[in-house]
Image (spheres, rainbow, N blue to C red):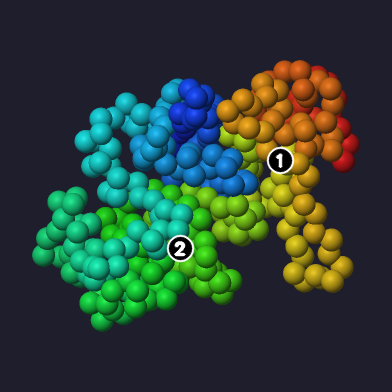
Amino acid sequence: MSAGDFLQVEDLVVEYDADHGSVVRAVDHVSFDMRRGEILGLVGESGCGKSTLGFSLLGLIKGGSIKHGSVTFVGNDLVQLTQRQMQSLRGNEIAMIFQASQNVLNPTQKVWDHFVDTLKAHDAWDQSSKDRIHEILGKLEIPPSRLNDYPFQFSGGMRQRVVIALSLILEPSLLIADEPTTALDVLVQARILQLLQQLKMEMDLTMILISHDLGVVAENSSRVAIMYAGQLVEVAAAKSIFQDPKHPYTQALIRAIPDVKDIDKTKQESIAGSPPDLKNPPTSCRFADRCPRVREICRQQPIDLIQLDTDTDRLVRCLIYDRDHGTKFKK
């Protein structure tokens, strides 16, 4: 298996049915791959399609469907699997921490019952199950004595740890974490992310970390994919994204991050305008109306995701770097 053969997403298109027969293309011809053991950060504004992309890997798109493309996971195209095959794969091979996932815990069930139900649903309950539950809770710093408590007896951070433990109890190889620290205070967020990093190492996990916060993603990912209006606009090593962003949208995201070390002198910049309507997106550059470096040609043709250098994995969707047009703007 080559480095990128763990997960390969090729030309993926996901659409939702909208009002009056219209269609929302939430994921528009997205392609990327993942190496075993890496953490890929997926970042973008709300509504850009990043959560839908995560759902599509598990076949959990409510009200929509995959219209084109493939999702190849360790050699198998998940798009071609039956519903029964996907049900077997969920949890066992690929697991997801859902956004606001604390709300998925049943308030009338003890924490112990959540684990029992999860294991039995996958025919994975056996004599070692109790030890496995205690082990994963220990990794997440939850005393086994809390198994007989109800979710409402836990703090928000502790409930989130329970949800993470439930997602990992079947020992999947790929974990999709969709905004795993939403609604938690800053110190709890930091500890949750630290624990995820530890679990990644101890359990040999490959992870997709979905967030709107570029700072969080850059600090906790090996590679970062920037998503805008249903498309990937830049993919690069986390250090490169943070230190030398190429796409104008990525640059704007970086400028929008406040400098907490020098907060009095920092002028936090917002991104003017709004993303395009995905019911009727432009066929040319989708960031053109908000881009300070837009040219007329940017509004005239589709923009491809191009590789900047043959010896790197850096990809960018911008005519500034398109060799076919001969000009490379200076910063």
* Label 1 neighbour load within 10 Å: few <14, some 14-19, many 20+: few
**Which residue: 27% across, 48% down?**
92
**Location of residue 272 in the rendering, given as x and y in whole percent from the top left corner:** 78, 45
**Location of residue 45 in the rendering, given as x and y in whole percent from the top left corner:** 63, 46
Q: Specify the quadrant of the image occupied by residue 218.
A: bottom right
Relative vertical location of residue 143 with respect to residue 246 in this rendering, above or below: below
Relative vertical location of residue 97 with respect to residue 55 in this rendering, above or below: below
- The quadrant the C terminus occupies is top right
Inspect this view and state whether residue 233 appears.
no
* Label 2 neighbour load within 10 Å: few <14, some 14-19, many 20+: many
Residue for badge 1: 274
**Which residue: 43% across, 23% down?**
67
Residue for badge 2: 196
Cβ–Cβ under 8 Å for marks 1 and 2: no
Left or right of 116 on screen, residue 154: right
- The quadrant the N terminus occupies is top left
Which amino acid does the dot numbered 1 rest on? Ser
Left or right of 258 on screen, residue 47: left
Helix or strand or loop: what does disc 2 sit on? helix
Relative vertical location of residue 265 with respect to residue 231 in this rendering, above or below: below
Which amino acid does the dot numbered 2 rest on? Leu
